[in-house]
Image: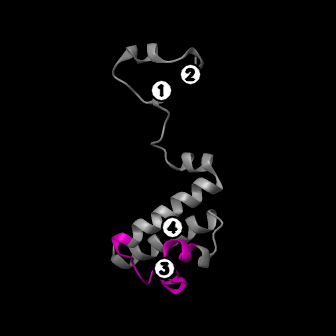
Amino acid sequence: MSANLVNIIFGMKIRQARTEANMSLTEFAAACDLSPSYVTEIEKGRKYPRADKIMRIAEVMAKAMMISSPSAWMLRWPTWKPRWLRPHSNVFHLRSLAWSQVIW
């Protein structure tokens, strides 16, 4: 995959996440300590941010998504499961559960 295509896809995903979190461009830029024009360049695929800026963007997005819809945030992460739903090699794990947690 070419670098230009990666930039475009990354920018599209940033814009998609920002709009789903109901954040304006200026709100998002201020929360990330970036200029609105730089965020626009990222979203259009013209720029690719450094790792520290990507971390800031991810932190802001995580907070925004948790605030806007906690249940939707959990559904976005398919690897997240309650402890009692995770597969275990130990069959005796069920003994540690409360009866209300066991789904028959």
- Image position of 1 with respect to 35: above or below: above
Query: Which label sits on residue 34?
Result: 3
Q: Which residues are magenta?
A: 28-52
Task: Name the residue carrying label 2.
Answer: 101
Name the kind of residue labelled 2 in the image. Gln
Q: Secondary structure at mark 4?
A: helix
Tell me which numbered mark, 4 or 2, is placed earlier along the sequence: 4
Earlier along the polypeptide chain: callout 3 or callout 4? 4
Which amino acid type corresponds to the residue marked 1 in the rendered image?
A: Trp
Residue type, label 4: Lys
Residue 100 image offset from top left, x and y in percent: 60, 18
- Mark nearest the camera among 3 and 1 is 3
Q: Which residue is mark 4?
A: 13
Q: Who comes first in sequence, dot 2 or dot 1?
A: 1
Indicate whether residue 78 is drawn in magenta.
Answer: no
Tell me what residue is drawn at x 57 percent, y 15 percent: 99
State which quarter of the image contains the C terminus.
top right
In space, the residues marked 4 and 2 are separated at their CA atoms by 36 Å
Marked residue nearer the N-terminal end (3 or 2): 3
| Quarter location, residue 98 | top right
Residue at 63% over, 69% down: 23
Q: Are marks 2 and 1 in contact (CB under 8 Å)?
A: yes
Q: Nearer the viewer, mark 4 or mark 1?
A: 1
Percent position (x, y) of residue 24?
64, 74
